[in-house]
Amino acid sequence: MPRRLGARQLAQIESRLRTFFTDLAEDLEELEADTSMERGVDAEDEGDTAADEALLGVSIAIMNRERDTLHAVVEALAKLERGNYGLCEDCDTPIPAERLMALPWAPRCVPCMQEYERDFA
Ligand SMILES: [Zn+2]
């Protein structure tokens, strides 16, 4: 049987999620400012365009990944408020405490996550 989370662990997870949320939101703001700047400046400089485009692509990929994580963090906080935190989104079984301590915004248990990644990756 997987261990369930105690009140102290839940409080710990909640504060970690809130910290993650703040950090990610700040990061995203910076990335968004950077990418919109890059887009504007080098329009005339043909030689650098390809390199800039590549860089922009990387920034956008990071931004997208951070947005996904931010979304998962928000979901996890909402679940904490609703009192159903720690249940797998797909099969409703409790996600093992070890997994949640390692990845507090994990929305699914390991088997469901593997299946999800197989379907959407
Ligand atoms: Zn599951």
Image: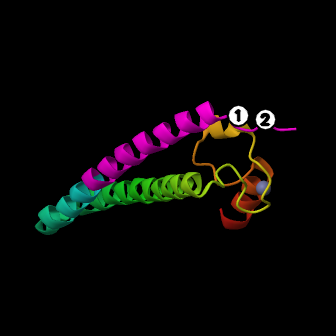
The stretch drawn in magenta includes residue 12: yes
Question: Which residue is located at x 67 percent, y 66 percent?
Answer: 120
The range drawn in magenta is 1-30
The disc placed on residue 98 is 1
Residue 119 lies, in percent from the top left, at 73, 66
Q: Locate the C terminus by quadrant.
A: bottom right
Q: Does mark 1 have its CB less than 8 Å from ligand 1?
A: no
Residue farthest along the right direction in this orientation: 1
Question: Which residue is located at x 27 percent, y 59 percent?
Answer: 32
What is the magenta segment's predominant secondary structure? helix
In-image side of 1 versus 107 (left or right): right
Q: Secondary structure at mark 2?
A: loop
Question: Which residue is located at x 59 percent, y 38 percent?
Answer: 10
Closer to us: 14 or 62: 14
The part of the image, by quadrant, that contains residue 103 is top right
Question: Which residue is located at x 15 percent, y 68 percent?
Answer: 43
Circle 2 is placed at which residue position? 3
Residue 88 lies, in percent from the top left, at 73, 55
Closer to us: 110 or 83: 83
Residue farthest along the top direction in this orientation: 8
The part of the image, by quadrant, that contains residue 58 is bottom left
